[in-house]
């Protein structure tokens, strides 16, 4: 997808291109081309796959298409025009006579759901939903890849209705979408063969006002987590329906296995359980106490990972096993959000630990053998070590190297209810934070 | 007769055990099955529903560059996005092109600027130097007559 976008940019500069794609990525390439104004891109298709096979097989696939490569480079000319392009607002209205089951059947057939039943987004319900925000319905929140679908406020409201959200949830949903679109890697996450996903971490006064669950079972499921569930589902549906990122034939996600997190993943900080002297995460990240925000982060697989610990009494007994557990992310190491349970946070502070001291202890103990990087799957992709490691650190296969560039890569918050287990979410990049704005039905997030 | 009586007594004792201590000897109330309202099939109605997908961002048609007249004497850039075996694929392309066309020059971009093989969207973490970087597009467009790119996977 990105190579195709870049190829079109090179074409615009006057230099022709030939783009070699595998059969499995052909549809994605064609749709990506349309999204940047090319109806018929200069493609040469080889049978999937190219990776994971030996050199002779790769060579044979090239030999079979060499004449085609030469043709597309010299004599080829585009023949398929760009399809007609309707305006993003107002959205198309579809009429149907039938029952709610018939509506759901139609939505499934058209690929307009995440696979679960939906609330039909009638014009009346969408209008009610739009009352939750002061943003105008034709305002564009962003353009979502790979389809480059236009996410207007109206489109966000439609998906929010479908997900079961209420009007007062819409500002949180819009902020979540804005945050994800600010992360340059979300488009990759929406189409990758990996199990990429994201979470939406809501913080601030709006959490209590709209009734999000931040205590027992904060990540659900259950009736107590209904608000979390519908907010996460709405954000996921906007990103994937408008962005065209469900697997074929409904979209262009190439995820091999997928992850259930992609149905819905929104949760909230347990501010009530923050130990004395510990700031809410948004304050650590430069926002004000009174701000309500959504923090989103692209993560490499279904997370959080629960970190079992029944025997810890001290800060060290809490933090060191956690550090061992979170030390290795086989895909893209770099950052981690630690979700301490309230009891773990209390144990740590009882030993006089600040958040900074806790981060440092995790950093000091989160180490992996060098050969996990030089021989592991991460190395197979990039053929380069993480930027924070020096070459000599990797030359000794038995050396232990830090899992994170610095203690700052470790963020700590408190989530959940009584009990002794904590959790963590590993990610390649820092969380992107968006302030919740435009709320009309809550005091917070206005 | 005696055998029948013994079997009956065993049977009664077994039933008693199954019934449990709470019900032993106690009269059982008769189960009353209430008849609920007959379910009414959901009425059909007319729905006016919004299309939740929206539309792709309207774009002006892009005119693609003019193709090269021949590979002979031209400089061809090969762009590997860093995915496994993409380099093997493009190395084979280079081998076949140089065999087939006179005075052809092949530039493997990843050997000149290793950052061009960043497969992540926007190019690595920062977005600079990778496939999303406009400076890289310009450099490639200016340094060769034709770019052959491999998506691999």
Image (cartoon, coloured by chain):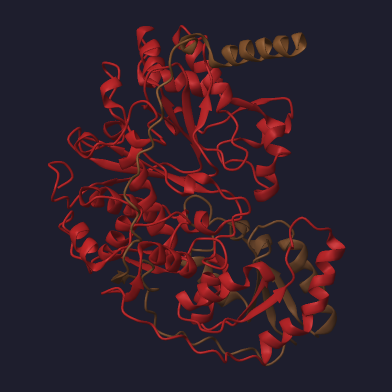
Chain colours: A red, B brown
Q: Extreme right residue here?
A: A56
Residue drawn at point x = 62 percent, y = 10 percent:
B13
Q: Percent x, y for residue B94?
A: 77, 73
Who is closer to the viewer here, A36 or B69? A36
Where's the N terminus of chain A, which quadrant? bottom right
Q: Percent x, y for residue B7?
A: 72, 13
Q: Percent x, y for residue A224?
A: 33, 33
Any part of residue A120 in sight = yes
Any part of residue B129 in sight = no
Residue drawn at point x = 45 percent, y = 54 percent:
A116
Say how many tags the image has: 0
Q: Percent x, y for residue A217?
A: 40, 29
Left or right: A350 in relation to A79: left
Who is closer to the viewer here, A162 or A89? A162
Q: Quadrant of residue A158?
A: bottom left
Position of A300 relative to A47 (above/below): above
Who is closer to the viewer here, B152 or A110? A110
Left or right: B79 in relation to B28: right
Q: Extreme front residue here?
A: B1
Position of A363 relative to A334 (above/below): above
Q: Quadrant of residue A65?
A: bottom right
Residue drawn at point x = 41 percent, y = 16 percent:
A344
Position of A388 relative to A32 (above/below): above
Position of A368 relative to B34 (above/below): above
């Amino acid at each position: 997808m990105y190579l195709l976008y870049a190829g079109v940019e090179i074409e615009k500069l006057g230099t022709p291109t030939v783009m070699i794609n595998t059969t499995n990525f052909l549809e994605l390439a064609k749709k990506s081309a349309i999204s940047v104004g090319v109806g018929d891109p200069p493609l040469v298709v080889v049978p999937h796959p190219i990776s994971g096979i030996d050199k002779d097989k790769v060579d044979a696939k090239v030999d079979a298409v060499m004449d085609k490569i030469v043709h597309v480079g010299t004599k080829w000319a585009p023949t398929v025009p760009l399809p007609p392009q309707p305006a993003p607002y107002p959205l198309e209205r579809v009429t149907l006579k039938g029952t709610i089951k018939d509506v759901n059947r139609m939505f499934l057939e058209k690929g307009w759901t995440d696979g679960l039943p939906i609330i039909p987004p009638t014009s009346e319900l969408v209008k009610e939903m739009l009352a939750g925000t002061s943003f105008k319905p034709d305002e564009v929140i962003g353009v979502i890849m790979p389809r480059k679908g236009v996410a207007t406020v109206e489109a966000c409201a439609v998906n929010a209705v479908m997900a079961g959200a209420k009007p007062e949830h819409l500002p949180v949903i819009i902020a979540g979408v804005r945050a994800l679109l600010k992360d340059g890697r979300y488009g990759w996450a929406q189409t990758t063969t990996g199990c990429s996903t994201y979470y939406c971490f809501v913080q601030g006064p709006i959490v209590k006002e709209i009734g999000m669950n931040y205590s027992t079972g904060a990540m659900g499921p259950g009736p107590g987590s209904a608000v979390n569930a519908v907010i996460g589902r709405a954000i996921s549906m906007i990103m994937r329906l408008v962005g065209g990122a469900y697997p074929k034939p409904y979209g262009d996600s190439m995820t091999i296995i997928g992850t259930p997190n992609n149905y819905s993943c929104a949760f909230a900080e347990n501010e009530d359980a923050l130990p004395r002297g510990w700031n809410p995460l948004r304050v650590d990240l430069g926002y004000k106490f009174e701000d309500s925000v959504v923090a989103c982060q692209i993560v490499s697989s279904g997370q959080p990972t629960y970190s079992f610990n029944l025997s810890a009494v001290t800060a060290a007994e809490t933090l060191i096993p956690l550090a061992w557990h979170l030390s290795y992310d086989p895909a893209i190491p770099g950052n981690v959000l630690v979700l301490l349970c309230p009891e773990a946070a209390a144990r740590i502070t009882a030993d006089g630990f600040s958040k900074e001291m806790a981060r440092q202890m995790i950093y000091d103990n989160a180490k992996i053998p060098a050969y996990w990087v030089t021989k592991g799957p991460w190395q197979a992709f990039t053929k380069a070590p993480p930027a924070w490691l020096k070459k000599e650190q990797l030359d000794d296969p038995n050396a232990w190297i830090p899992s994170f560039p610095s203690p700052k890569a470790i963020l700590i918050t408190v989530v959940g209810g009584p009990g002794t287990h904590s959790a963590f979410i590993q990610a390649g990049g820092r969380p992107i934070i968006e302030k919740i704005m435009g709320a009309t039905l809550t005091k917070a997030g206005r | 007769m005696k055998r029948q009586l013994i079997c009956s007594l065993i049977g009664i004792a077994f039933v008693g055990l199954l019934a449990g201590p709470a019900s032993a000897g106690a009269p059982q109330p008769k189960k009353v099955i209430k008849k609920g309202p007959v379910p009414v099939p959901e009425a059909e109605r007319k729905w006016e529903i919004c299309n939740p997908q929206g539309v792709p961002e309207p774009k002006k048609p892009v005119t693609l560059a003019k193709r090269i007249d021949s590979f002979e004497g031209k400089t061809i850039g090969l762009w590997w996005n860093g995915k496994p075996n993409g380099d093997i694929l493009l190395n084979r392309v280079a081998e076949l092109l140089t065999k087939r066309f006179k005075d052809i020059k092949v530039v493997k971009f990843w050997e000149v600027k290793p950052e061009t093989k960043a497969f992540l969207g926007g190019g690595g973490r920062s977005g600079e130097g990778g496939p999303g970087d406009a400076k890289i597009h310009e450099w490639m467009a200016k340094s060769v007559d034709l770019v052959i790119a491999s998506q691999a996977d």
